[in-house]
Amino acid sequence: MGKSKNDLINNPNGGMTRLIEIMRRLRDPQTGCPWDIEQDFASIAPYTIEEAYEVADAIERQNWPELEGELGDLLFQSVFHAQMADDAGLFDFNDVVRNIADKMVARHPHVFGDESREKTSEQQTKDWETIKAAERKLKSERGVLDGVAPGLPALMRAQKLQKRAARVGFDWPDISMVVDKVVEEAQELAQAQTQADVTEEFGDLLFTIVNLGRHLDIDVETALRATNDKFVHRFEYIETQLEQKGKTPAQSDLSEMEKLWSKAKVSRA
């Protein structure tokens, strides 16, 4: 039996069965890895989030060989959580697979059921939300905003909360009203006196900016990631230009760096 299990673990064509067995062995109380044995859902969750971001990063850079590895790392996170659940008698990996398979079939009646595929993507999105609303009801999630995970990145969660509220009519009907609200929140931030007030008003302004992005049909997380990358590229251009002069940014001044920043913009750095 032991030889059979080892054969599976060393079989490059063992597929999911191999990966699940590797995870089971890592968590074995007697012969497993001490670090893996000590972990729980809470301690592994940050790694799960990190792996998801690394998948997104590989996609953004169109690094397909790296994406292959990152998808494996993310898959391993699901296997890890499922094994911990199995250890606790909650569910196992097969339950996870069955759950998502059943959900996908139920959410796509136009593919797996009798509904017609002859409808727009907008109508399919509406139908999808109707199905998910019914699922939330079964979970006793009665409030409109129930189920929007608090652990999401703040910008992403803000956008999801706003989308949920908009579905029941709590939304500005015109984008100009959102712009006016941005101006209003910026003025309130400028007038804030205490640090607590500044923090609160800044949050309000940021939340409204997210709302503006939603009205412009922009994914705010994606937009900010792109701007972050642009900032990095342009600042690296400044560093490179200064290095050619035998200087570092710390040895430069704002005026010189702003001129180089302008050149970086022209060169699309």
Image (spheres, grey):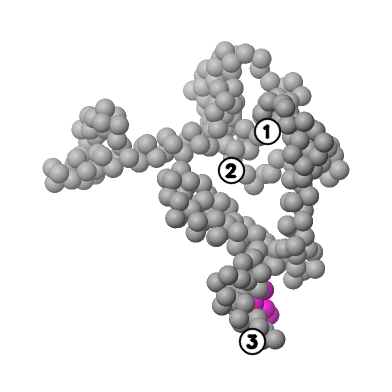
Left or right: 1, with 131 as reference point: left
Residue 161: mark in rendering = 1
Query: Can you tell which quarter of the image residue 197 is in?
Result: top right
Residue matched to label 2: 153
Looking at marks 1 and 3 on the same chain, the residue that comes earlier in the sequence is marked by 3
Q: CA distance from mark 3 to mark 2?
A: 45 Å
Q: Nearer the viewer, residue 160 or 195?
A: 160
Left or right: 133, with 219 as reference point: right
Tag 1: amino acid: Leu
Looking at marks 2 and 1 on the same chain, the residue that comes earlier in the sequence is marked by 2
**Residue at screen point 86% across, 43% down:** 138
Q: Quadrant of the C terminus?
A: top left
Query: Can you tell which quarter of the image residue 161 is in?
Result: top right
Residue matched to label 3: 3
**Residue at screen point 72% across, 26% down:** 119
**Residue at screen point 66% across, 73% down:** 21
- Magenta stretch: give its range: 24-29
Q: Quadrant of the N terminus?
A: bottom right
Q: Is-magenta flag for residue 74?
A: no
Helix, strand or loop for disc 1:
helix
Q: Is-magenta flag for residue 25?
A: yes
In the image, residue 240 lies at what x, y percent?
A: 22, 43
**Residue at screen point 44% across, 36% down:** 226
Residue 41: mark in rendering = none
